[in-house]
Image (cartoon, helix red, strand yellow):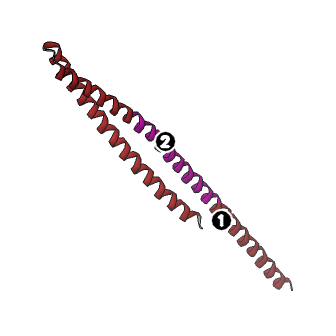
Amino acid sequence: MSIKRIIRIKEGIKELRARELLQIEANIRLLEREIDSLEKEASRVNEEAKNSFSEALYAKYMALVARKKELQAKLLQLRSIREEKREKLKEAYRDIKALEIVKERREELERARNLNIELQNTGFLHLVRQFYRNG
């Protein structure tokens, strides 16, 4: 398999990982907004409960707090997944860069080998010309 093909495959993997990372970040933003709205709702219910205490308001407040804790746990989980995805994306970038360096070195060696062959051919032709001139 050629290095160019491997680089293209790695580019595809990189793009896939980048899309996954963007999706996770979008989910994180969505959860953060939902947590913010729950906090606002909980503070509103808390103020209502302070003004006129009732068990229904207390139950609603506790449900909001429980939901907020659930979402925060999920948010922490998504953030850890995001870090894993970032590391995998960085790894893909490193792989691509390493392959590009290998490709460039291989091309340099090929150019040097071709140049050496040309120089040898030129030297040989020079010797042949000299032989026929002197001979």
Q: Residue furthest front?
A: 55
Residue type beneath disc 2: Glu
Q: Is residue 44 visible?
A: no
Give the left or right position of residue 131, taking residue 79 as reference: right
Residue 105 falls in which quadrant of the image? Answer: bottom right
- In the image, residue 76 sits, relative to residue 111, either above or below, namely above
Q: Residue furthest top?
A: 51
Dot placed on the residue nearer the N-terminal end, 1 or 2: 2
What stretch of residues is rendered in magenta?
76-105
For the residues marked 1 and 2, what is the alpha-carbon distance in whole angstroms? 41 Å
The residue at the point 23 percent across, 30 percent down is: 37
Of badges 1 and 2, the one in the foreground is 2
The residue at the point 60 percent across, 54 percent down is: 101
Question: Is residue 15 inside the magenta stretch?
Answer: no
Q: Is residue 90 visible?
A: yes
Q: Are marks 1 and 2 in contact (CB under 8 Å)?
A: no
Specify the label residue 84 is tagged with: 2
The residue at the point 51 percent across, 46 percent down is: 88
Q: Position of residue 38 (x, y in %)?
A: 24, 29
Give the left or right position of residue 55, taking residue 93 as reference: left
Q: Quadrant of the C terminus?
A: bottom right
Specify the label residue 111 is tagged with: 1
Q: Main secondary structure of the magenta part?
A: helix
The residue at the point 59 percent across, 56 percent down is: 99
